Structure formats: structure tokens, C-alpha cells
Amino acid sequence: MPLSRKEANERITLSAIRDAYFRGDFEASVDLCDAFRGRADADSLEVGLLRARSLLPLNRPESALETLRGLRLTERSRDEYITAQMLIGAAFVALGQHDHGLKILRAAQSISEGAHRTVRDELLVNLAIAYYRKKEYSRAQPLLDAIRPESDIIYARALEYSGWLAWARNDFDGAVDRFTESLRCIDACRHYDRFVEAKSLYGLAFLCGELPRLDLWPAISARISRFDWSVSGVAVWRYWLAIEASFATELLGDRAESARWASLAESTAPSPSCAVVALCRLAALFGRYGEGGAHAYLFDKAPRSYEDLARGGGLRDELPLPLQLAEEVA
């Protein structure tokens, strides 16, 4: 017999919330936090921090800030206070307010001596991300290099961002190594973050077709097939992985598989503009191999979809799209 809402609420424990968060089920973690009815102030504080932690990877920084502002914090609870300040800073960075977020993160670091080492490592990663967003790469890398392997999924995240830093510096072989290390680390981690895995996998898939490093494709393909794409929040990464998979399999000479990946990208596009990019990919693929009818159909459909977006004001945040469409027109 299913539990009533009242019974379910009464049975929600801190342990259940922690388990949901550490297995990477951030939506469940938020739901459990919302339903938790603990009485102790310490419990309420931990639940609030777990809720904010769960909201940030789900790209809900405003909600995370709202949660954090409602917490009762003093510097006496050093780990919790520093964690809250770190999350506030990370939320402002996620909102694009990089300088303000960095100021808060630096202030947290200035009082972090004596805090738990894992808390300090996570703070360093968030500081590095803030510098990365500001394109201050030389300041970001030493922070990432200081993270210990013992920090588990935090270390995997540091490796992922080391990959993006190498990419930004045009060190593509270094980026391949870092993304590969991140994925290997995830396999050995006690805790999990599906966004770290999806982003590392995307970075590796892009470089596989761009360099090209087609020797990477079998392992990438196997990992894509194992990943649980039904969970929310990863649709954009599934889409871009499908685009990159289309390029890689075309380079490997498998036209049918390349078309299948491009079609998957179109059908799972997280936005209308992404659907236009997928149509351009399909048109280019069919056009190169002399399939004129399919190319003509897709070549006609992509510009019409683009025009619909332009009329509806849907291109304000899609600056690269006109160039992608123009490349296929040319």
C-alpha cells in the first residue's frame, strides 16, 4: 500500500537526502529537501545547503541563492559557513556576475584555514571556475592542480575543467588527456555527478572528430550507450554529443550511422535553434554524397526554420547560428 504524503514526509531522513545528492540524483534531492520536516536547527542547515548544492548543477542559481539567504549562519560553524559562502559565490558566477561571485569566493577562501580539506578543495574548484569564466586561465590552473585525488567527484570536476582550460589554450592533446582522466576518475568515485560525466564526454567527442582522434571513438560510443539520458538536465549534452557523433562516424566512413546520429540530434534538439543546426548537419551530410533530393528538402527547411526564429525574436541568444546556416548555404 503506498504511503500517504504525511507518512512519506515523516519518513524522509537526512540520510535519504544525502544519498540522493551523492548519487547525482539532484532532482530527487531537491524534492526530498522540500518535503523534509526536521526540527533541529543543525538539520535544517544541512538540508538547506544540500538543497542549494542540488539546485546549482540543475542550472537554477536564483533558487539556490534564495535558499542560501534563508539560512541562519555564523562563522562559528566554520565548514557550513564557508560552504554557504562558496555556494553563494558559485551562484553569482553561474548568473554571469563573475566579479561579484569571485569577491565572495575569495573572502571565503581567506577564512578557510582549518576547514575540512574537502570543503577547501571544493572552494578551490569554484574559484578556478570563476577565473575560467573571466578568461584568467593562468590563475585558474594552479587552483585545479592543487585538488587532491582523495576529494573524489570534486577531483573529477577539477580534471574536467582542466580539460576546458587546455582547450581554451589550444592544447587539444592536453584536453583529451584531462577529459579521459576525468571519466576514468568518475568510474572509481564513491559519489557521482552526471553533469561532470556528460561534459567530459562531450569534450572528448568533439576532439575525437576535430583533431581527429578517431581511435577514441569506440570508447566514447560505448560510454554514450551506457549513460542514462532519461534523467533531466542533460538534454543539451545529449544533443551536442549526437552532433559530434555524426561527424566522427562520417569520418570513419559509416554514412548510415552518421545520418542516424544527426537525425537523433534533430529529434532531441533542446531548442529551435539547435534543430536548425541539426538540419544543416543533415543537409551537409546528404549533399556531400550526392543525395540531391534529401539535400534539397533539408536545405529548404533549415532557412525557413531560421526565418521563423528571426521573426519571433529567438536569435538574440543564438549569435553563432546565422554563421552556421550561411556555411551550409555557401
Image (cartoon, helix red, strand yellow):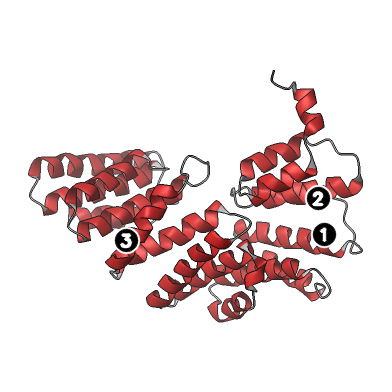
Give the residue number, with chain letter if any, for mark 2. 46
Q: Element type at marker 3?
A: helix
Percent coordinates x, y for residue 220 in the rendering: 37, 58
Q: Going from the N terminus, do you reach mark 2 or mark 1 first?
A: 2
Q: Are marks 2 and 1 in contact (CB under 8 Å)?
A: yes
**Could you tell me which quadrant the C terminus lies in?**
bottom left
Query: What residue type is disc 1 on?
Result: Glu
Q: Is residue 44 visible?
A: yes
Note whether residue 170 is visible: no
Q: CA distance from mark 2 to mark 1?
A: 8 Å
> Is the C-beta separation of discs 2 and 3 under 8 Å?
no
Residue at the (67%, 71%) spot, across then down: 124
* Above or below: residue 319 compared with residue 261: below
- The answer to which image quadrant residue 138 occupies is bottom right
Q: What kind of residue is marked 3?
A: Trp
Res 262 label: none
Please name the residue that numbered disc 1 is placed on: 80
Q: Nearer the viewer, residue 69 or 87?
A: 87
Q: Secondary structure at mark 2?
A: helix
Residue 236: x and y, percent?
44, 48
> Whole-percent x and y of residue 115?
81, 70
Q: Which residue is mark 3?
A: 217
Q: Quick one: quadrant of the N terminus?
A: top right
Residue 201 shown left or right of residue 32 in the figure: left
| Of pointers 2 and 3, the one earlier in the residue sequence | 2
Mark 2 Cα-neighbour bin, 10 Å: few <14, some 14–19, many ≥20: some
Q: Nearer the viewer, mark 2 or mark 3?
A: 3
As helix, strand or loop, the secondary structure at mark 1 comes to: helix
In the image, residue 76 sits, relative to residue 318, either above or below, namely below
Q: Are marks 1 and 3 in contact (CB under 8 Å)?
A: no
